[in-house]
Image (cartoon, helix red, strand yellow):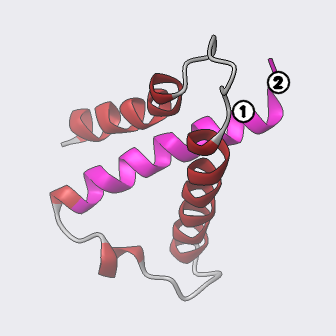
Amino acid sequence: MGAFMTGMGALGGILPDSVEPPKNPRHRSFFHYILGGLAFIFYSLVLLGSLKILSFDAAMYFYGPIGFLFLALISGYASHFFLDVFVSS
């Protein structure tokens, strides 16, 4: 299961650049900033919920292997957005 979660995280990390390639003039458009921002906000809620800072229980929404794989995909997508915010090209 760990290998699948790692793979889904990696897939989520490269997904925005697969949809909007860096050589495209519309790079860092909708799929980077809008969906990436939403993924980052969602992942922040999950992280704050797991640290018991907020009362957001991710286990209630992401129960089972499919839910955890989806959460890994969102985590990779959010990390791509986070790195794009701090690294400009």
Asked if residue 54 is positioned above or below residue 79 in the image, the reply reads: below
Rendered residue at 51%/68% (across/down): 46
Whole-percent x and y of residue 63?
23, 71
**Under tag 1, what secondary structure?**
helix
Q: Residue furthest top?
A: 23
Circles 1, 2 touching at the beta carbon (< 8 Å): yes
Looking at the image, which is closer to me, 68 or 17?
Answer: 17
Examine the image and state in which quarter residue 87 appears: top right
Q: Is residue 22 left or right of residue 17?
A: right
Q: Quadrant of the N terminus?
A: top left
- Location of residue 44 (image quadrant): bottom right
Residue 29: image quadrant is top right
**Could you tell me how far apart the alpha carbons at marks 1 and 2 are, in whole angstroms?**
6 Å
Q: Nearer the viewer, residue 47 or 10?
A: 10
Q: Is residue 10 magenta?
A: no
Q: Which residues are magenta?
A: 67-89
State which quarter of the image contains the C terminus.
top right
Where does the image place residue 78, in percent across and percent down from the top left?
Answer: 57, 47
Q: Amino acid at mark 2?
A: Ser
Q: Which residue is mark 2?
A: 88
According to the picture, the residue beneath numbered tag 1 turns out to be 84
The single residue placed furthest to the front in the displayed view is: 25
Image point (82%, 34%), residue name: 86
